[in-house]
Amino acid sequence: MPRSSLRLLPALLVGAALAATPLAAVAQTVTFSGSGTVVQPFAGLTTGAFGFSFTLPQSPTPGFSSIAGFRLDGVTGAFTQVGATTSLTGSVFFLTAAFDGGFEFYGIGPGPSVFNVDGSQLFSGTSAAPTFVLGSGTPTSIDGSARTTVSSYTIAAVSTVPEPGTWALLGTGLLAVGGVAARRKRTAG
């Protein structure tokens, strides 16, 4: 084996090891968004249209689960009414089809204390190991005693963007390959 090939052997072995190593799965997230109407003024909100959004892992680990559904605590998001946006923090309970499906948001602080979406079950799997189903819809029923009603909702995937460190590593690798190619060209010519 030529001496120049032996110098490349460690680099080839490292490259083969890296290629054989499985990449860590990127946790997919989804955004819940929708619109509705404040029926009864409360907590500084006025009667009229509102919008909401919050982002969750597509396959979350529930804080609580039962045959009725599962609860996620510490959910943060945004609530918009008349052009002003307030932060939302609270718990979201997602219901199984046997319990009218949809979800209920229980907020803490400014913004709505409760809004709900009754409709289809928004997740597949079990209450203990759910995965949200992407799509949009219109609630099948609205609780007449609620201070807010939701008229439409969407569950959409959030695109994953590589971190700056990933781009830097890619650039470094490309520079190294270019450097090796240039060096080979100089020694060959």
Image: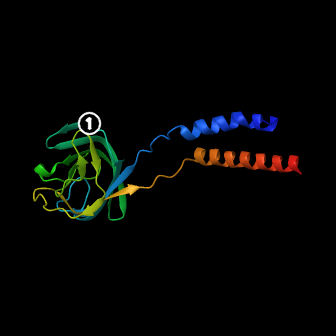
Q: Position of residue 100 (x, y in %)?
A: 12, 53
- Residue 92 visible in image: yes
Where residue 183 appears, x then y in whole percent?
82, 46
Circle 1 packing at 10 Å, graded few (<14), some (14-19), many (20+), is few
Decide which of 141, 80 is in the foreground and name it: 141
User: As drawn, is 28 to the left or to the right of 134?
Assistant: right
Give the side of residue 61 with respect to residue 169, left or right.
Answer: left
In percent of width and height, residue 145 lies at 10, 56
Does any portion of residue 108 appear in the rendered image?
no
**Residue 44, located in which quarter of the rendered image?**
bottom left
In the picture, measured across the screen, residue 181 lies left or right of residue 162, that is right
Q: Which residue is mark 1?
A: 63
Q: How many marks?
A: 1
Which image quadrant: the N terminus?
top right
The colour scheme used here is rainbow
Residue 84 occupies quadrant: bottom left
- Residue drawn at x 71%, y 35% is 9
Residue at 21% x, 51% y is: 103
Residue type of the residue flagged with mark 1: Gly
Residue 186 is left or right of residue 10, and the answer is right
**Dot 1: what SS?**
loop
125, 16: nearer the viewer: 16
Residue 134, x across and y down, in percent? 31, 57
Q: Residue furthest right?
A: 189
Which residue of the protein is positioned furthest toward the front in this rendering? 1
Residue 8 vertical placement versus 146 (above, below) = above
